[in-house]
Image (cartoon, grey):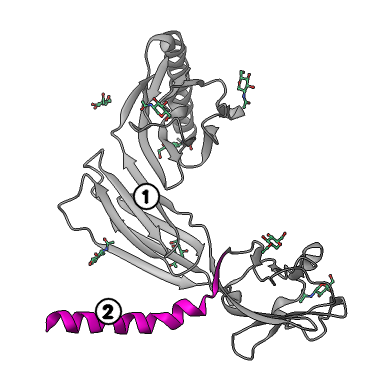
Amino acid sequence: MHIIIAALFVVIVIVLLIPTIARGDAKVSCVFKESCILPCSFQGDIEEDPYIHWMHLSEGHPLVYLHYDNKEQLTTQDQQFRNRTSLFKDQLSRGNASLQLAGVQVQDEGRYSCYISTDNREKESFIDLEMHTPVKVSIQHVGNRITCSSEGIYPEPELTWSTRPPSKVSFKNTTTVEQTKQQLYNINGSLIASLDESDRVYSCTVSTQRNRRRASLRQLQQINGSDLEATISCSSSNTSLMSLIWRFNHSQIIVSRSGPSDNYTVSERWKQHVKGVSESGNLILKYLSSDQDGIYSCEISDADETVITETCMRISEGNSAKVGVTIGVVSVLALFLILCCKKKRDKLEDK
Ligand SMILES: *[C@@H]1O[C@H](CO)[C@@H](O)[C@H](O)[C@H]1NC(C)=O
Ligand SMILES: *[C@@H]1O[C@H](CO)[C@@H](O)[C@H](O)[C@H]1NC(C)=O
Ligand SMILES: *[C@@H]1O[C@H](CO)[C@@H](O)[C@H](O)[C@H]1NC(C)=O
Ligand SMILES: *[C@@H]1O[C@H](CO)[C@@H](O)[C@H](O)[C@H]1NC(C)=O
Ligand SMILES: *[C@@H]1O[C@H](CO)[C@@H](O)[C@H](O)[C@H]1NC(C)=O
Ligand SMILES: *[C@@H]1O[C@H](CO)[C@@H](O)[C@H](O)[C@H]1NC(C)=O
Ligand SMILES: *[C@@H]1O[C@H](CO)[C@@H](O)[C@H](O)[C@H]1NC(C)=O
Ligand SMILES: *[C@@H]1O[C@H](CO)[C@@H](O)[C@H](O)[C@H]1NC(C)=O
């Protein structure tokens, strides 16, 4: 009995699915602002002048493209598609009536029909256009709040947090989503982290149906650098396949490399302080002073993830600075004396 019901169920499902399969719309996945080709073709060559009619099957069935008398006929073309459509003229005689649509936007999503006819043949086919954007995610922290944001993405994204190793404490998270005029989404999330548990990685993942990207933040302990040389570590993972940027105080770029086979570029401002970058991405600095006290962040990215490792460094005066310190002490003493004298004199004058 159960078997019969199951069999019936399968048959029903198949019968229901057939129209969808049979509809056989071609699916095209387009990237926001880029050009996209909507495929449409006729079997065999087209000798005579074909009539080609492209329509968007949205409300009102706006005209996308029209071609007859051997030329495009665009006076009745819908405003939405103005200046953005073209056929491949050299391909027409081969029965290829594919449409190139430039600057794809959210409104262009949906079903299209392509109708071709010649004196003795005609054909209509349907194309489903879906649009998406790449996903970029940025993560940063201010105090113990970590914020994560991603802008201009489509379709609607989701934001999730995770930690490595997994955190037992459940963190409070807030997420807001807004839609821009172009119908793209901006998403923001934040959580309060316990950054004193150093070496825990906080990750934020923004995902759409098509794309996803993760940004992670790892805060290392404070280190005390010597003025002679200091090494700041980046990450234990294999950096040989990734792009890498070292930043100071979240803004100044110290060194960067855009790909694994590129050389590192050292910014002019940091040339005198950069001794090198190790194979694993560690930054080696030299000739330091308290001017270089601050936050060093290493940002490595691959196709799926960006990992930012932050280290706070304080330079402790040492070896090479001894002469400098002596001079420094002398000058401070001198300054002190001058100020003291001035104060005394001021006091005397006040009286
Ligand atoms: C299309 O291009 C023409 C000429 O470059 C321009 O005058 C017109 O405003 C454009 N139309 C749209 C809808 O962008
Ligand atoms: C039609 O022409 C376009 C542009 O050259 C090409 O990308 C596409 O593959 C062609 N389609 C067919 C069915 O030949
Ligand atoms: C965000 O917090 C809510 C409860 O406040 C929780 O249900 C949800 O799973 C959290 N989301 C993520 C991605 O951590
Ligand atoms: C995300 O955060 C920034 C800075 O706090 C704010 O300016 C922006 O409006 C926020 N966006 C959303 C979608 O909440
Ligand atoms: C760095 O120096 C400070 C003060 O001099 C000290 O308290 C701290 O323990 C030192 N940290 C490390 C990692 O050596
Ligand atoms: C990093 O990856 C490269 C290329 O796949 C490989 O040659 C190298 O041995 C790896 N290094 C480490 C430390 O895993
Ligand atoms: C990297 O540096 C080496 C040695 O200075 C040079 O030969 C090579 O052309 C550089 N490569 C790139 C991609 O700039
Ligand atoms: C860098 O940041 C540290 C700590 O926030 C600050 O003390 C220092 O003045 C900053 N340095 C520069 C050059 O902005």
State left or right for residue 81 relative to residue 242: right
Q: Is residue 213 above or below residue 109?
A: above
Asked whether 257 or 190 is in front, the reply is 257
Q: Is residue 190 above or below residue 256?
A: below
User: Which quarter of the rendered picture does the N terminus lie within?
Assistant: bottom left
Asked whether 261 or 66 is in front, the reply is 66
User: Which quarter of the rendered picture does the C terminus lie within?
Assistant: top left
Residue at (78, 68) in percent of width and height? 92
State left or right for residue 265 relative to residue 42: left
Marks 2, 1: nearer the viewer: 2
Is 331 inside the magenta-drawn segment?
Answer: no
Label number found at residue 141: 1
Q: Position of residue 110 (x, y in %)?
A: 56, 78
Circle 2 sits in a helix, a strand or a loop, which is it?
helix
CA separation in Å, label 2 and label 1: 53 Å
Query: Magenta-highlighted stretch: main secondary structure?
Result: helix
Residue at (37, 49) in percent of width and height? 141
Q: Which residue is mark 2?
A: 10
Residues packed near mark 1 inside 10 Å, few (<14), some (14 to 19) or many (20 plus): some
Q: Position of residue 227 (x, y in %)?
A: 41, 17
Q: Which residues are magenta?
A: 1-29
